[in-house]
Image (cartoon, rainbow, N blue to C red):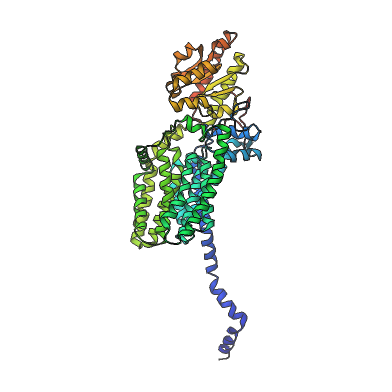
């Protein structure tokens, strides 16, 4: 009795009363912390999964990326947007935002200065940026999902990350040294801002209009086709507006101002400096006015991604769209930038590089749509439905991966033209040609540019036209005679290289080169390396160079798919020894 009374009195003491709720709440504390860290953990895990796949590509950097690297070097050294010292300004790049990151990295000593832990910073820095952009992309997916399925945003992130990790097109081009990871990040950011605004009723808020505009501006500066994301916010606004038209109009005007003023200023600067409203690269690639039939090529993306995964993703999205509510509105907002990215991909000219280089934003947004739809559907289903969904998604991911296996094996064995190969094959080799032939202040004409610009001591004439206005205009007009006259009669470079399409397309055949006074130094398929005979004072040197070149170039070309290192730095007179 006394013991019972004492216990009752003790339980009424203030300190004891407070301790009981604390004891009951203690199990929820760790659980709450786990939930809080679930989304960041999912982002890190998915990023690591993608990074592991990217590591399989070794130190490969595609040569096109090195063109941007060369421009970053010139800008950082105060020479302006030129390919090499002394060259005229030509916008031979199409990624000014990525170029700015390269130039900043060089200024900070993080890029184009040497090696870190045995890895050249020409490889390490852009791949590190790619990893950060990948993590940012997945963080945007998690951020968007939190507004729709707050307790399972981690699941959306992991599923989207798994889809991207199994897609070598996304992985390879994101870690190629090109601007793809930044472009993918802007696509994910656009989708995340729109999803959260629609889900939380803040679409017409000034903050949403400004943020969406700023991200769209960055996308347009990352790639020319990124400008299509400028239409995402206005379209979602038009689809969502029901009342308060005046507020919607104000938000649209604010968004337009954020985009139009700086982008308009950039276009005016471009025209003032380069005399064009578009990059010279677009002129050289002869991008034509798009036709409706071009959109059919987007079907190839479905085949590559895997019909099973595409079908299941579409079914999940359709099921979500059929049910009114926040999830449907959010999914519509996410589908808008996806459809715009598909449109942009469809109207671009055909790309010669493998694995759909321009499809990165499509992969990002499609993975986000499929993952978000699947998790929303999961929450609405019972045990049996969830089991079917898990099996279907797992099987689709496996089929997608195995379906891509042949292309992936081919790409890993023969990756698209690498910076290191071009630096050695054209930069170093033609430097040696000029030295052994006694050519001072010589010009070399060739179509593979990136690694060449980083290592050459010669003046460069770009036969692809990316950094040459006259040649780009000839490609745009289809006037190959004007191109040949410009190269063989006006410029008359002392050294020249052509191969493959760069023989047939402009008509720089061996016979025409011979008529113009060029003799071969090294023959390669239907082209090879040539020197203008009258530029060499001692003809015996030509024979000596031929004897020097043959064994070295035979070996170099046979090993051109090697994805290892080509030295800590790539500068004129430095690099891997031949």
Query: Please, is residue 268 above or below residue 41 in the view?
Result: above
Q: Residue at x 52, y 41 (%)?
A: 222
**Would residue 217 be found to the left or right of residue 318 on screen?**
right
Residue drawn at (49%, 12%) of the image: 516
Q: Quadrant of the C terminus?
A: top right
From where the camera sits, is residue 181 visible?
A: no
Question: Looking at the image, is 415 positioned above or below residue 228?
Answer: above
Residue farthest to the front, as pictured:
246
**Which quadrant holds residue 435?**
top right
- Does residue 501 lie above or below 179 as drawn? above
In depth, the one of 379 and 347 nearer the eye is 347
List x then y, in percent, for residue 338: 42, 48
Q: Position of residue 292 (x, y in %)?
A: 35, 39
In-front residue for pair 329/435:
329
Left or right of residue 101: residue 344: left
Do we see residue 137 in this rendering? yes
Give the left or right position of residue 387, taking residue 224 as reference: left
**Residue 44 image offset from top left, x and y in percent:** 53, 51
Q: How many marks?
A: 0
Image spot of residue 508 (x, y percent): 46, 18
Quadrant that contains the N terminus = bottom right
């Amino acid at each position: 009795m006394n013991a019972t009374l004492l216990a009752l009195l003790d339980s009424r003491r203030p300190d004891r009363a407070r301790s009981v709720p604390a004891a009951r709440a203690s199990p929820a504390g760790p659980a709450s912390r786990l939930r809080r860290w679930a989304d960041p953990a999912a982002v890190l895990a998915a990023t690591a999964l993608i990074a592991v796949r990217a590591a399989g590509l070794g130190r490969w950097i595609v040569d096109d990326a090195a063109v941007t690297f060369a421009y970053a070097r010139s800008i950082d050294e105060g020479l302006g947007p030129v390919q090499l010292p002394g060259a005229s300004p030509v916008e031979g790049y199409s990624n000014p935002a990525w170029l700015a990151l390269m130039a900043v990295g060089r200024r900070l000593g993080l890029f184009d200065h040497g090696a870190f832990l045995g890895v050249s910073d020409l490889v390490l820095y852009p791949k590190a940026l790619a990893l950060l952009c990948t993590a940012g992309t997945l963080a945007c997916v998690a951020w968007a999902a939190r507004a729709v399925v707050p307790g399972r945003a981690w699941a959306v992130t992991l599923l989207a990350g798994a889809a991207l990790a199994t897609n070598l097109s996304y992985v390879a081009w994101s870690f190629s040294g090109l601007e793809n990871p930044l472009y993918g990040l802007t696509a994910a950011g656009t989708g995340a801002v729109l999803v959260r605004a629609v889900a939380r009723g803040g679409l017409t808020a000034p903050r949403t209009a400004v943020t969406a505009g700023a991200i769209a501006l960055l996308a347009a500066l990352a790639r020319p086709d990124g400008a299509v994301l400028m239409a995402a916010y206005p379209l979602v606004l038009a689809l969502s507006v029901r009342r308060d038209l005046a507020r919607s109009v104000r938000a649209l005007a604010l968004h337009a101002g954020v985009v139009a003023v700086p982008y308009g200023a950039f276009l005016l600067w471009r025209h003032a400096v380069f005399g064009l409203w578009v990059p010279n690269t677009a002129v050289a690639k002869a991008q034509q006015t798009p036709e409706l039939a071009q959109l059919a090529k987007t079907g190839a993306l479905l085949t590559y991604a895997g019909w099973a995964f595409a079908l299941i993703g579409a079914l999940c999205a359709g099921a979500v769209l059929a049910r009114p509510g926040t999830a449907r509105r959010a999914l519509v907002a996410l589908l808008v930038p996806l459809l715009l990215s598909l449109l942009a991909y469809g109207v671009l000219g055909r790309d010669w590089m493998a694995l759909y280089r321009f499809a990165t934003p499509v992969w990002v947004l499609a993975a986000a749509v499929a993952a978000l739809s699947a998790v929303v559907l999961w929450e609405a289903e019972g045990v049996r439905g969830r089991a079917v969904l898990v099996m279907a998604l797992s099987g689709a991911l496996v089929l997608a991966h195995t379906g891509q296996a042949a292309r992936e094996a081919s790409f890993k064995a023969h990756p698209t033209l690498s910076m290191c190969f071009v630096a050695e094959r054209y930069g170093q080799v033609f430097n040696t040609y000029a030295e052994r032939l006694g050519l001072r202040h010589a010009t070399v004409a060739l179509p593979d540019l990136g690694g060449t610009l980083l290592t050459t001591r010669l003046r460069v004439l770009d036969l692809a036209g990316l950094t040459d206005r006259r040649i780009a205009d000839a490609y745009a007009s289809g006037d190959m005679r004007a191109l040949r006259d410009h190269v063989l009669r006006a410029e008359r470079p002392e050294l020249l290289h052509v191969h493959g399409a760069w023989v047939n397309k402009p008509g720089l055949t061996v016979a025409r080169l011979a008529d113009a006074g060029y003799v071969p130094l090294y023959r390669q398929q239907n082209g090879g390396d040539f020197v203008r005979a009258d530029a060499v004072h001692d003809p015996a040197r030509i024979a000596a160079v031929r004897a020097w070149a043959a064994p070295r170039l035979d070996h170099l070309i046979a090993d051109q798919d090697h994805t290892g290192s080509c030295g800590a730095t790539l500068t004129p007179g430095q690099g891997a020894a031949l």
